[in-house]
Image (cartoon, rainbow, N blue to C red):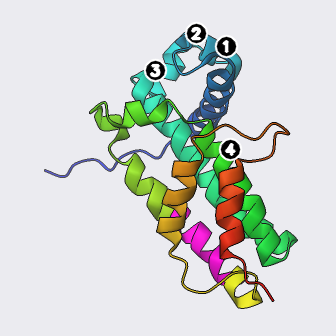
Amino acid sequence: MNAAAPRPTRADALQNLSTLIVAARTVFARSGVDAPAREIAAEAGVGVGTLYRHFPNRAALVAAVFTSEIDATAAAAADLLTEHDAGTALDLWVTRFTEFVATKQGLSAALRSGDPAFDSLPAAFTSTLGPAIRSLLEAAEEEGAIRAGVDPLELLQAIGDLSHRAPSADGSPNPMVRLLLDGLRLRS
């Protein structure tokens, strides 16, 4: 017996999914990841049932929001390289990445929770952000802005570890991250 092919997702369902992720990101920033489902649904302009059709539990929603933020952070690398010289693009991207990591402090506990919704996040993190920072490093190295041989994943890890500190008093990114980046620069 032939199984029926799965039906393609309707356009309105895809739009609802995107709207829910944006709404959840907004609500999580305002009220935290424990915000009521009805608040997220209201922000998205949909019913709670629509929210649960797309995300059967909070962990699935949190994972989807986190994944979309990983994708946006990675995509910013290419945009920055087209708008700035490679050294500046690297600095700006690291600032964005530092802010991204600093706002995800509570996620580390979720990643260790054992919830299967979070199982793919560590791999998504490195497989998506790794190539982004690699492209920035290669361009900056080719431009002569940084020294050769910087391992992209090691740099991501170092920035991530340093990003758990608060930003400096003037609101600029963590001074330890600045120090790390300064150590990569070539001096004439």
Gap in angstroms between the C-alphas marked 3 and 1: 13 Å
Sort mark 4 into few (<14), some (14-19) or many (20+) by Cα contacts within 10 Å.
Answer: some
Residue beneath label 1, please?
42
Mark 4 vs mark 2: give the one in front. 4
Q: Amino acid at mark 3?
A: Tyr
Gap in angstroms between the C-alphas marked 4 and 2: 28 Å
Look at the numbered disc 1 and give the secondary structure of its residue: helix
- Please, is residue 3 above or below residue 141 in the view? above
Image quadrant where one finds the C terminus: bottom right
Magenta region includes residue 136: yes
Magenta region includes residue 30: no
Q: Amino acid at mark 1?
A: Ala
Main secondary structure along the magenta-highlighted residues: helix
Sort mark 3 into few (<14), some (14-19) or many (20+) by Cα contacts within 10 Å.
Answer: some
* Horizontal relation, residue 11 to residue 146: left or right: left
Residue at (64% x, 16% y) in the render:
31
Residue beneath label 3, please?
52
Gap in angstroms between the C-alphas marked 3 and 2: 10 Å
- What label sits on residue 38 in the rendered view? 2
